[in-house]
Amino acid sequence: MEFNFLPKLPKSDLDDRTFQDLVDECILRIPRYCPEWTNYNPGDPGITLVELFAWLTDQMLVRFNQVPRRNFIVFLELLGIRLQPATPAQTELTFYLSADLPDTYEIPEGTEVATVRMENDEAIIFSTGEPLRIGNPQIAHFLTAETPELLPQGLRDRLSNLWSQQSDGSWQGQEQFIFDEHPQPGNCFYFVFEPQQDITGNVLALTLRGEAATATGINPDYPPRHWEAWNGRGWQPILLTEADDGTRGFSFSNAAENTLNRLEEADIILHLPLEWQVAHFGTYQGRWLRCVYVPTEETQTGYSRSPKLVGVSVRAIGGKVRAYQCTRIQEELLGSSDGTPGQTFQLQSASILPRRPDEQIVVIPLGGLPELWQEVNDFADSTAQDRHYTLDSVTGQVQFGPLIREPAQLKAQVQARSHHQAWSDNALSRGRSTVVQDLMEQQYGAIPPRGALIRMSAYRTGGGLKGNVQRGTLRIPKTAVPYVDRVINHEAAHDGADAESLDNAVIRIPRMLRTRDRAVTPEDFETLTLQAAQGAVARVHCLPTTSSSTPGTVTVLVVPQANLGSIYQGEGLDPSQLMLTSVCDRNSHLS
């Protein structure tokens, strides 16, 4: 491999002889060592042998001239440089229940869902990163407002003294306008849910009961309304597709086609955000969602009269949770210790993801209790009593502390510097006179006792660009979960990245040595942003400061990896696809 992107500094090969130089040199030596050999033509069998051995020597010199490259890699290892592991893609999995459950139902963490296995491609497995709790939502307030304020204040309660709550939790009563009697753009209504029920990320079926085929003046295929939920920072859309609105914009036109009843009911399927916090607006507290009357160019017409409702109820039919492209492996036995320093063990899988607190090595001595060992980046600060080990995330190799032979004088100086002790010249001179130049041994990190069993409590493996699957492809449950009818990803997976190559590491090292985790120049901010993103960011640009910039802050423009294809295809990026990050304190460590 040639580092063609590095500066071309003056250098020479250790041996610059070519194949023809070797052949000519051999022919020049023939008269001295074999004077009877006089035919030097290419067809002579002797010349053929000369060319054969010259070719073998030339191949050996090619390998010999790669020694400087090998030394370069060794220098990187001495600096503690390691190739960055693969980054797992992430998405949101939506689980739909097969039936309504009376109590809160939990789908455990680590539930696996995969793509369809093809003839030439293995299935790609995703695992949920946290438990999913599907609760029992209850509506506490039905409110209306004339304008959609960011922080609602002017609210009108439509439940008090007009509707009553039934034993099943639904509300029923007299007909109620959901907007003004003569609707105006911006009219909205709110449903406030009881704060005690944690239904974050749930999929709700909001059942509305109203007059069938109401002449509201809208096109039912393009109803002029938006469904939103408060996520703690703003109002987030929660209606996935228009097909999820069974009321067709509160007109109940589908229901009227199949029945002659005046009142009908239909469901609206709403996907709540993963961050659905309890908020306090006006005199009301709970979890908020709303519907806003917003005419658009597609709708062309708006409500000529406000729809009316006579009842509302809600139930949870599923939920969504974050998932990552990884497989969790538990209780893997690595082997038994032979009691020697520096011994290594190999995990069955490579591409190990960053470890969690419960993912570590367990050593079980013969006749003893299990011991938890701690993972470290290196053994520089480890003593012979520290139960430390290292784990290479790329290869999956586990190593325990080595035994280093070093001169006594060097060992004493290293220990003195590590303890920040100021020795006087006299003390040093007396120490030098008593130093024995024999080699001494220093153990860095404890050694598992001979015969002890070594196992990995758990670890996760996965990651790579292959995990960036399209929407709707994760449909095959790998873990049996009761009461789950189906599962799907409504959004494409993103942020998956392959493990770092040596070429990329060579590019990264000069920037890393220049910044040393501190940002001063705009290039430093760009470098540290890419490093912190771990493959999730494709492009970074630090914007120049202006007179209106806040002192001590820097603005970084970030293009997520998921949108990189739009750049390559020459497409324009929507501003929502970009992220602006303000990084404070120019000369401090960045997180």
Image (cartoon, helix red, strand yellow):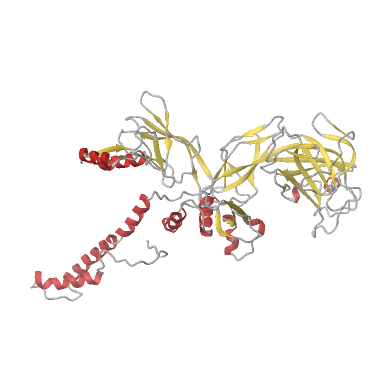
Quadrant of the rendered image containing residue 388:
top left
Image side of residue 475 versus residue 217, left or right: left
- Left or right: 331 as drawn, with respect to 438: right
Q: Is residue 396 left or right of residue 407?
A: right
Residue 190 in the image, given as x and y percentages of width and height? 80, 42
> Nearest the camera: 171 or 243?
171
Residue drawn where x is 14% and y is 76% of the image: 39
Task: List x then y, in percent, for residue 362.
Answer: 42, 32
Q: Quadrant of residue 171?
A: top right
Question: Please, which residue is most extreme toward the left here?
Answer: 36
Q: Is residue 407 visible?
A: no
Residue 314: image quadrant is top right
Image mark count: 0
Task: Kindly identify the residue that appears in the image at 88 percent across and 51 percent down.
Answer: 183
Above/below status of 507 relative to 475: below
**Residue furthest to the top:** 367
Depth check: give the residue in front, 560 or 438: 438
Q: Position of residue 293 (x, y in %)?
A: 82, 51
Q: On screen, 531 above or below 135?
A: below
Q: Nearer the viewer, residue 224 or 5?
A: 5
Question: Is there any visible trace of residue 380 in the rendered image?
Answer: yes
At 30% across and 42% down in the image, what residue appears? 413
Residue 105, percent across and down?
Answer: 66, 32
Q: Quadrant of the N terminus?
A: bottom left
